[in-house]
Image: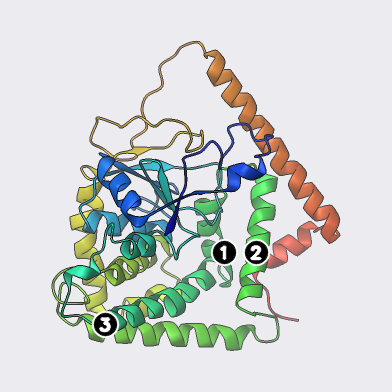
Amino acid sequence: FFSCFPKPPSLFPRNPNQTPSASSHLPAMASAATAAAEWEAAARKTLVARKPGFGLPTACPTCLPVLLYLRMSQVPFDIHVDYRFPDADHIPYVEFGECVAFNNENGGVIEYLREEKIVDLTSKHPSVSYSDVLSTKAMISTWLADALQYELWVANDGAHGSIARDIYFSDLPWPIGKVLHWKKIRDVKRLMDITKLNAAEKEEEIYRKATAAYDALSTKLGDQSFLFDDSPTDADALLLGHVLFVLNALPATSMLRSYLQNYDNLVKYAEDIKVQLVEVGSSSAGSASSDMPSSSTPRKTSSSGQSYKPKPKAKKERTEEEKKSRRRTKYFLAAQLISVLAFLSITGGVDSSALDDDYDMDYED
């Protein structure tokens, strides 16, 4: 059994000040067969992801593998950019019919689709042991994911910090974005158990594991088109998402990028897929909308055939609904600001020098 979530508004109230009732958090339980039926009935699915950037259809390292998995599976889908929850861990998610597969539940979107036999690329490899696929995925999801998190949030390079801000917080008001960015840096350090005393040792360990992972994966890939024979698995989606992000988003000064570029077959592997699935797919496999309202707002499929191309806005008087939407957005931003101020008051406040220290990542005593 699994949780088949009715679409918002119960999960994402249109009014930012609205408090959902306790019953609105209770998902309707349905069988895997029901989910499969919902999937088949939905002519097009919707992937809700973070905005595009760096020449990629989504600039988010968590969203990119899901997008690649759907395109490898030849699933027709639209892309919707959600600006209202820039750092939420439920993004990415896929809507199909009355169901939603969230990133932070059931092992993530890819694992959920695979386990429920809705979309399972690995099942096309009967001769491949799933334990081999699982161990490969574990290496990507731990050693490589940790190294990328370190580069985005902790590495002592200002360019890395600006990349993370662009992806997650650039659409928020400056004070809110700055505080949330600082909080994320602190959370990642705590999660990785990084302190001023062990920072150098931890950095060496992170890059050593990442290099070992690249070496093992390069050997596994060899001169094949994919990791397991000549057709993709979910492990390929994870690895390709990682490699494409590192090569396209991280700056030339990135240590992780320099280590990756030592493995020519991994670089070629990602570049070939970028041409086949990312660039070609952006104009055919899915259309995108990037409006500000939440995913509860009905989405219109673009007929232009081009992804992420903003529609020209006609000059017209705002409707009453548009005025209400703008007011709700203002209420939402006000509520965010109040929550940030409350957070600062509870934790004793954060002065600008503390923030600057975190952005600079100065570990010297």
In this view, the mark in front (3 or 1) = 3
Which of the 4 image quadrants contains residue 24? Answer: top right
Q: Which residue type carries mark 1?
A: Gly
Element assignment for label 2: helix
Find disc 1 in the rendering and name its residue: 158
Q: Position of residue 23 (x, y in %)?
A: 62, 43
Q: Position of residue 21 (x, y in %)?
A: 66, 40
Relative to 167, is 247 on the left or the right? left
Query: Image point 77% across, 62% down: which residue?
Result: 353
Query: Image point 71% across, 67% down: which residue?
Result: 357
Q: Position of residue 246 (x, y in %)?
A: 38, 67
Element assignment for label 3: helix
The quarter in which the N terminus is drawn is bottom left
Mark 2 in CB contact with mark 1 (< 8 angstroms): yes
Find disc 3 in the rendering and name its residue: 218
Element assignment for label 1: helix
Query: Image point 39% across, 32% down: which residue?
Result: 299
316 above or below 147?
A: above
The quarter in which the C terminus is drawn is bottom right
User: If you read the primary sequence from the N terminus, does the residue marked by circle 2 or circle 3 appear first?
Assistant: 3
Find disc 2 in the rendering and name its residue: 359
Q: Disc 3 to disc 1, how far (Cα)?
A: 30 Å
Q: Disc 2 to disc 1, how far (Cα)?
A: 7 Å
Q: Position of residue 80 (x, y in %)?
A: 40, 41
